[in-house]
């Protein structure tokens, strides 16, 4: 079958024997480990009897091992168990090579047996448990049958899956056939409708040919009017192009003026920066007890020469003795801010400063009546 994998069939045929052998070996090791652990706890029996000389260790080992083997249930299922117990010197205690008759032990013999038992136990015993599962037994056949059933189950599952795929493909194939039949019927119906439409279209074409001929005759009579309209339209387009050229020229002129203004503004800013730097250097050199804010220097440069002299006169007084300067009012700042003092010079000009520490002050703003609102807003932000 097309959907049945050949490799799965081969594996299901070949794997059960190998898995069977591996399972037998694994089960032998498991049973051997379990029996070895169980035998280690019982094969010497009660050591008190051995140490008082009541029983020889050979007899105790034989009796306990025989009882252990007799209690096993798996040998009836085909598990063969071989147990050997020997001393360090290689003397086998189980299985015993011969069974000599025992007589009643005297007190001297009991001491001798106890010493011998103690010596053997002190030297240590070597215990060996060998487990072998024979073939063609109940347990081995059960294992083999289990793996064969598992392989058959796998084959059955693959067979079911293959049958399911075949049925699905058959259903799909049948659906395709039914769909094609429906499409054929729809195409036949559509072909009939198209034939009817073709006849109608043929009639419409004949009608449109008559109308076209009529429109062609009508268009020839209006061709002159269309040419006049076309010439008029071309004239308007030319006028529009001329207007666009004029507007482009005006835009270019405005761009040149903007560039010129930007250059002049940049030069003015550079000159202002140079003036601010020069004034700052001069103030730092002449007035050691004051510091001047950049806002104050910019305001000073905007004044006339006469006002500049008056303003520097106030700065000189602040440098020498701030208390000698006549203060018009105090400008209180926001919470946790220092008080700023206002000084009037040259009638309408104003200077604002604050005390920093001791007699040292900081000149914050120099301006006029016209710039007072901006100056106060600047002070409020400090």
Image (spheres, rainbow, N blue to C red):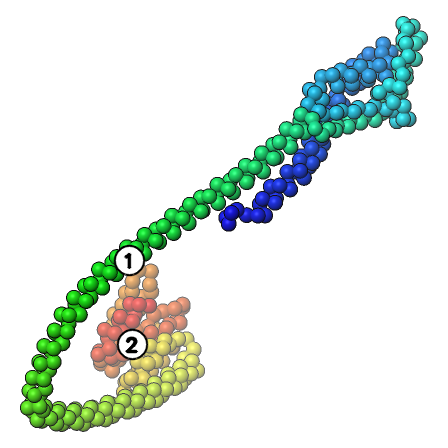
Q: Look at 60% across and 41% down and name the residue there.
A: 12
Q: Look at 15% across and 93% down and name the residue there.
A: 234
| Residue matched to label 1 | 183
| Vertical arrangement, residue 268 with respect to residue 352, above or below | below
Q: Mark 2: give few (<14), some (14-19) or many (20+) Cα within 10 Å.
A: many
Q: Secondary structure at mark 2?
A: strand
Give residue 265's quadrant in the image.
bottom left
**Residue 70 percent coordinates (x, y):** 74, 16
Mark nearer the N terminus (1 vs 2): 1
Q: CA gap, disc 1 to disc 2?
A: 99 Å
Q: Look at 28% across and 55% down and name the residue there.
A: 182
Give residue 255's quadrant in the image.
bottom left
Mark 1 and mark 2 in contact? Answer it, CB < 8 Å: no
Q: Mark 1: give few (<14), some (14-19) or many (20+) Cα within 10 Å.
A: few
| Residue matched to label 2 | 351
Q: Nearer the viewer, residue 187 or 79?
A: 187
Q: Nearer the viewer, residue 107 or 304?
A: 107
The quadrant of the picture occupied by the C terminus is bottom left
**Residue 105 percent coordinates (x, y):** 90, 7
Q: Nearer the viewer, mark 1 or mark 2?
A: 1
**Is residue 15 toward the left or the right of residue 337 in the image?**
right
**Residue 369 percent coordinates (x, y):** 22, 78
**Is residue 60 toward the left or the right of residue 20 in the image?**
right
Q: Look at 29% across and 84% down and name the residue there.
A: 302
Q: Is residue 194 at all visible to an observer of this figure?
A: yes
| Vertical arrangement, residue 12 with respect to residue 300, above or below | above
Q: Which dot marks residue 43?
A: none
Q: Is residue 327 at all visible to an observer of this figure?
A: no
Report the number of discs: 2
Q: Secondary structure at mark 1?
A: helix
**Residue 2 percent coordinates (x, y):** 51, 49
């Amino acid at each position: 079958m097309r959907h049945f994998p050949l490799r799965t069939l081969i594996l299901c045929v070949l794997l059960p024997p190998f898995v069977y052998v591996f399972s037998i070996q694994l089960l032998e090791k498991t049973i051997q480990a379990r029996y070895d652990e169980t035998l280690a706890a019982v094969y010497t029996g009660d050591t008190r009897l051995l140490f008082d000389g009541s029983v020889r260790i050979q007899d105790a080992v034989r009796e306990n091992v025989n009882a252990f083997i007799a209690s096993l249930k798996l040998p009836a299922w085909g598990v063969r168990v071989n147990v050997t117990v020997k001393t360090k010197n290689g003397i086998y205690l189980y299985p015993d090579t011969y069974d000599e008759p025992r007589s009643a032990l005297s007190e001297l013999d009991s001491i001798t047996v106890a010493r011998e038992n103690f010596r053997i136990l002190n030297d240590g015993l070597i215990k060996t448990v060998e487990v072998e599962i024979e073939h063609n037994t109940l347990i081995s056949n059960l294992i083999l049958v289990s793996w064969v059933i598992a392989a058959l189950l796998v084959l059955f599952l693959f067979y079911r899956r293959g049958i399911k795929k075949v049925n699905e493909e058959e259903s799909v194939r049948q659906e395709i056939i039914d769909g094609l039949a429906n499409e054929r019927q729809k195409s036949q119906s559509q072909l009939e409708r198209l034939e009817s439409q073709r006849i109608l279209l043929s009639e419409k074409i004949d009608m449109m040919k008559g109308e076209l001929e009529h429109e062609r005759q009508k268009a020839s009579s209006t061709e002159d009017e269309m040419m006049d309209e076309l010439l008029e339209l071309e004239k308007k387009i030319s006028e529009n192009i001329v207007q666009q050229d004029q507007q482009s020229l005006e835009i270019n002129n405005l761009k040149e003026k903007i560039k010129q203004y930007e250059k002049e503004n940049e030069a003015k800013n550079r000159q202002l920066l140079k003036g601010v730097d020069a004034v700052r250097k001069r103030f730092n050199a002449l007035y050691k007890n004051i510091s001047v804010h950049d806002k104050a220097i910019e305001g000073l440069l905007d004044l006339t020469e006469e006002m500049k002299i008056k303003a520097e006169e106030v700065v000189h007084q602040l440098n020498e003795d701030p208390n000698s300067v006549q203060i018009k009012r105090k400008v209180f700042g926001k919470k946790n801010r220092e008080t700023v003092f206002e000084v009037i010079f040259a009638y309408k000009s104003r200077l604002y400063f604050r005390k920093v520490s001791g007699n040292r002050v900081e000149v914050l703003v120099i301006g006029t009546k016209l710039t007072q609102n901006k100056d106060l807003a600047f002070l409020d932000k400090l």
